Image (cartoon, grey):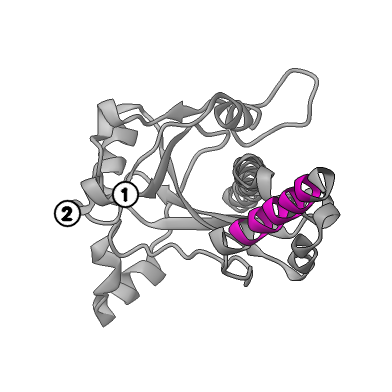
Amino acid sequence: MACYSVTRIAVVSVMFLACSVAAGCSAMYCGVSRPAADLKPLAPELAGFTDETVEAYLKSRPEADFPCTPAIAKLGSASGADFAGHGEYEMRMMESEEAEGWRKLVTKEGTPASPVEDVHFITPMLSGAHPDLKRLRHVAAMLHAPILLVYIEACNSDEGRNAAAMGYWTIVGLFVVPGHTVGHHSVCQALLVDTRTGLILATAEGDAKREENVLPGAVEIAARRVERRSRAEAVAGLQADVIDGLRTLATNARK
């Protein structure tokens, strides 16, 4: 009788745990949506073009010398505490791997010629926490960089139960079924801007989406891992697109 009671208590405890897990994250995973970046807070003047402005842009022919030295600025969505009165974006510091990826654009001895001879990084110390495009051009000029590369990183994440979560109602399934899905979508959008005139020379983009099915006890760890990989892939895609754009500009400049 005592053995039966212990077994019964164990079964009830496991079922209660299963109910707790299911209730703790009751939402189903619907997929992570692609984030979008809006340029209007960064460059309000681009939203109010007149016919004369359009004509002036079409007639202009900015010339950049290659190989060049771009000034690079990274922006991200402002936090709620910093949003009021400052627009939507704020300066972001790059992680070491990200900065190293930009440095690899520079021509190395024994490698094919690159249109980039050096890179400068714009920091909040120079630009302030919430710069607009004009302020970033001023900083690029201070750094003697004829081209400004400014990019915005936007991210969305989501998590929830997937179809396999039905297995949580069994004792074994609670511990072996990856019934939760975590997802992260990162988008990096960039402008290559002529520092002197403010004209946009080219655009570039990197996009990466990562999803992973995990056990209920590993959601937080997996979410951080998926975010890290998604952001790294988006930046790598952006860097590849930027170097292609600079090569095209360099080829056109020689014509």
Residue farthest to the left, as pictured: 85
Q: Is residue 7 magenta?
A: yes
- Looking at the image, residue 115 sits to the left or right of residue 150; the answer is right
Q: Which residue is mark 1?
A: 78
Relative image position of residue 11 (x, y in whole percent): 76, 54
Q: Position of residue 22 (x, y in %)?
A: 63, 62
Q: Is residue 246 above or below residue 37?
A: above
Q: Position of residue 239 (x, y in %)?
A: 62, 43
Question: Which quadrant would residue 53 be assigned to in this image?
Answer: bottom left
Residue sitting nearer the eye, 30 or 98 = 30
Type of the residue with mark 2:
Ala
Q: Secondary structure at mark 1?
A: loop
Relative height, residue 46 to residue 66 (above, below): below
Residue 240 in view, yes or no: no
Real-space CA distance between mark 2 and mark 1, rounded to the nearest whole angstrom:
9 Å
Q: Which range is magenta?
A: 5-20
The answer to whether residue 20 is above or below residue 222 is below
Q: First in sequence, mark 2 or 1: give its number.
A: 1
Q: What residue lies at 34% left-to-right and 35% top-to-bottom?
A: 140
Amino acid type, callout 1? Ala
- Mark 2 — residue? 84
Image vertical order of residue 248 relative to residue 121, above or below: below
Position of 138 with respect to 149 (left or right) is left
Farthest front residue in view = 1
